[in-house]
Image (cartoon, coloured by chain):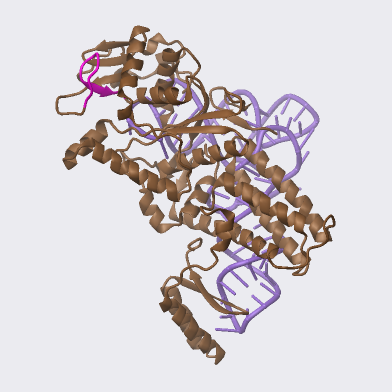
Amino acid sequence: MALHVYDHVTRTRRLFAPVHPGQVGMYVCGMTVQDKPHVGHMFAFVACDMIRRYLEHLGYAVTHVQNFTDIDDKIIVKARQEGIDFRVVSQRNIDLYHECAAVLNIRPAHRYPLVTDHIPEIVAFTADLVAKDHAYAAGGDVYFKVRSWDEYGFLSGRHVDDMRSGVRIEVGEAKLDPLDFALWKSAAPDEPGWDSPWGRGRPGWHIECSVMATKYLGPHFDFHGGGRDLLFPHHENECAQSCCGTGQKFVNFWLHNGLLFLGDKKMSKSDGNFFAMGDVLALFPAEVIRFFLLNAHFRSQIDYGEDRLREAGVAYDRLRRGVRRLAERRASGAAPVPEGLLSGPGEVLSRAVREHRRRFFAAMDDDFNSAGAIGVLFGLVRDLNQYDAAAGPELLDGAPLDEAWALFEDADRILGLHREGLAGLVAVTAPVVPQEVLDLVAERVAARNRRDWAAADALRGRIADLGFAVEDGPDGSTARPAIPGGD
RNA sequence: GGCGGCAUAGCCAAGUGGUAAGGCAACGGUCUGCAAAACCGUUAUUCCCCGGUUCAAGUCCGGGUGCCGCCUCCA
């Protein structure tokens, strides 16, 4: 099996082949930084991060470019409301993005181009489209001439003549055709603007991505990511501009992630129907959120809900405990069976691990199916547990145990489930428990020792009220945070 | 009105021709003072409905029903 990627233009999965051997160019539509990032945004970036990690695992040198749209109407409005420069608004939200991305274990892009740093290139690209008769200036604006490109609509699967287009002309616009869209918009005197051959203005929404993507990745590159809601008009327009400007095919594979829903509505800034990422991070560990987001195929729609996150936390815990148990066993000091030999349970484990490895990568090769791949990991945990039960504490089949560990490590590098990696995960075995709770635990141990069960149960209740759960083991009692995944 | 997507157990979810992954919940068991945690086991003769193609269909084709998205800013 080799990597196959879904291509929604042909509605099939195609064998992946890079434009340039050994290299992959990936452009991800970043945020319009009018507001703080919400969970829906971060879903898109987590998905692209997983994809990038897998491509790197396959050995490609990936160049990941992710823009910030730092000037647009809504940013201007916001800045005006607050009485500050638009740059303050956009920088503030860019900073927030980077904070969220870091805790979600999203690897930094190689470049984060800003629209406002590329005005000369945007002007040049626009002028070129005008020169090629794919665009025209009108009343200080410049519009892309949609009907000048025969293939317009191929990406989103619509036909120019079918579009309900009459409603799109706004007062003051001078489009020749309602379908046309702005490359350059004239600016009012009190608005931010830059000089151009058409007067003072600012870029339209789509042109920035054409300019920055082709500048950093070349006219034709491999992957372009972004939410499903960007398909039309944004990516359709971006694609039209790029193809007309460069005369080449633009993108080989589009990675449109499904949208995150809240209740029965799409999470959306403009509807106010969203959870800010920072607020969700206060409720659930970042690892659990990332696990939750990767536990469905990235192209499908996900419903956000706290119950769902809680479930994900429990599931994630099972996985993590499996990894920890394996680490403990490998470090247990039990005498390994001689090299080259396997015990009966070791034999069974060995076969299982090989099969899990095959299935894990088959899932990833199948359009980056992280959900299927995660399912395989749970199977590994189960087989490891069965080995534990069958082998007892004395046996230690080094080879299959090493192979199992190696698969967890590969999986972790690809899925990015643990911020510190597997070694870090295993090291974190002692969650922080406040002294107050420790004291109660000690009190309860004393009560148990004098077989005062009523007092012991009451103490357990008080500890639970503080958000901790007690576990009694052969070596005494311990407390841990009651929230799954909370350490 | 145009275009597109989805429908798999109580819930979430993978599965694009070969006889239903996985997680949560539930139940049974081991353990426990009781629990919790942990581990083991059980839980869809069946994939919205009706036709068709095929030796074989959740998977392909046709029709129907239901839900949703896009066509306006949006990850």
Q: Which range of residues does the magenta coloring cover?
A: A193-204
Chain B's colour is purple
Residue A22 inside the magenta-drawn segment: no
Please give the count of numbered marks on the rendered protein: 0
Q: Can the viewer see residue A297 in this picture?
A: yes
Q: Residue at coordinates 58% horizontally, 46% vertically from top-left?
A: A413
Residue A237 at x, y percent in the picture: 40, 21
Look at the picture and state if A398 lies above or below A365: below
Look at the picture and state if A192 lies above or below A427: above
Q: Which chain is brown?
A: A
Look at the picture and state if A73 lies above or below A279: above
Q: Residue at coordinates 74% horizontally, 46% vertically from top-left?
A: A355
Q: Is residue A340 left or right of residue A389?
A: right
Residue A8 at x, y percent in the picture: 54, 26
Residue A63 at x, y percent in the picture: 50, 32
Location of residue A271 by image quarter:
top left
Q: Can the viewer see residue A35 in this picture?
A: no
